Amino acid sequence: MHSPARKIKKSSVKNIVRFPSSKNNRTLLLESILESQFALFLEYDNSVEAYYEQPETFLLLDENSKKHKYTPDFLVIFENGSRKYIEVKPKEKSESLKYTKIFRLFEQRVTQSGDSFEVMNEEFIQQEPFLQNLKYFYRFRNFKNVNMELFEEISSNIKMPVHFKALSEHYDLKSLYQLIAFGYIKFDIKNQPFSINAEVWLNEQ
């Protein structure tokens, strides 16, 4: 099992967040609410096979041979085998001279081994209504036994697209939410706040 490269300790300037990862089947200790929000994106991204928090501490040398220790927030492993290190940090902080220098050194380091690096800030992570939709449905990903018989029944009997209200009048609400949470039933999750009147369709890929 993966262990974080450095221990996360409580402090007056950090909000330690326990994030129950369905994809990793364990609870992650994250250093900010922003990190936990980004973890939601990773949970829903079907191209992500696994991801690890605080994966490794790197020793970086700048042009003056000064040493800098740096631990990225996440290592993301994709289904195609590629790897990407992620730093999650507020935009203003990530664009400071201190961090832009470290990020530049780190990106040079990891690209030499074929990996990539990206900095994520609140402008990307806190897009609404996408984030609220992810939060709402994530609770239903904790139930692993998805009702696929219901999915097949809906696929056979219901002409899509349809308003969610029509489905809720005939089928178990919790099971429908599970199908949405795992991507079997789709709606415009990025641009439309979910409601009973949302237009939905089946993901039959």
Image: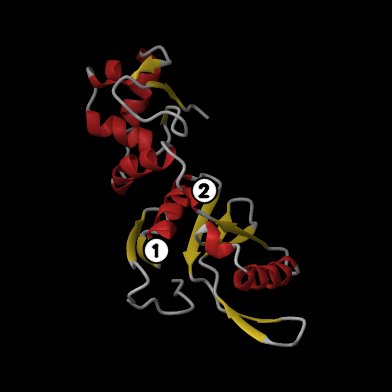
- For the N terminus, give its image quadrant: bottom left
Q: Can you tell which mark lies on residue 85?
A: none
Front-most of residues 96 and 10: 96
In the image, residue 155 above or below residue 117: above
Q: Is residue 69 left or right of residue 11?
A: right
In the image, residue 186 above or below residue 122: above
Identify the residue shown where x is 38% and y is 15%: 162
- Residue 90 in the image, given as x and y percentages of width and height: 50, 59
The residue mark sitting in front, 2 or 1, is: 2
Identify the residue shown where x is 32% and y is 21%: 164
Residue, disc 2: 123
Residue 118 picture quarter: bottom right
Pointer 1: residues within 10 angstroms few (<14), some, or many (20+)? some
Identify the residue shown where x is 69% and y is 68%: 104
Q: Is residue 19 left or right of residue 5?
A: left
Sequence-first tag of 2 and 1: 1
Identify the residue shown where x is 50% and y is 57%: 50
Report the amino acid beneath label 1: Ser
Q: Can you tell which mark lies on residue 32?
A: 1
Give the secondary structure at mark 2.
helix
- Residue 40 in the image, given as x and y percentages of width and height: 42, 50
